[in-house]
Image (cartoon, grey):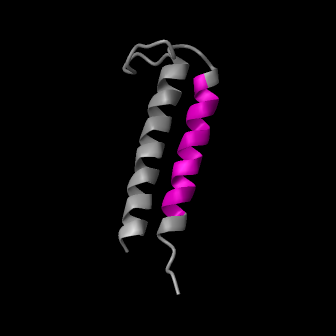
Amino acid sequence: MRASLGLTLLGVLLVGSGLVWIAQGLGLEWAPRSFMTADRTWVFLGAAAAVAGAALIGWSRQPRP
């Protein structure tokens, strides 16, 4: 149970980070400014992180035998 909670939290952090990276890569006004701003590479990396985080959340929520 503890491991699944930790994996779920890690997945949530990955999804959140990925969404921020996407926003920065797109150069959105509300996104924090950094070296990632308006660099399309971060859009793809952010999308990959968000998808990986969502998959990790889904996997960690599966019932175990």
Q: Which residue is drawn at 43% across and 52% down?
A: 10
- Which region shows up in magenta? 42-58
User: x%, y% of residue 57?
Assistant: 48, 60
Q: Which of 26 and 37 is in front in this view?
A: 37
Residue at position x 54%, y 66% from top?
Answer: 59
Q: Is residue 63 left or right of residue 47?
A: left
Secondary structure mainly formed by the magenta segment: helix
| Point 48% across, 26% down: residue | 23
Q: How many marks on residues? A: 0
List x then y, in percent, for residue 26: 54, 20
Q: From what the image shows, is residue 3 above or below residue 25?
A: below
Question: From what the image shows, is residue 35 above or below residue 23?
Answer: above
| Residue 33, image x, y percentages | 40, 13
* Residue at the (48%, 21%) spot, across then down: 24
Nearer-the-camera pick, 28 or 21: 21
Lateral position of residue 58 relative to residue 2, left or right: right
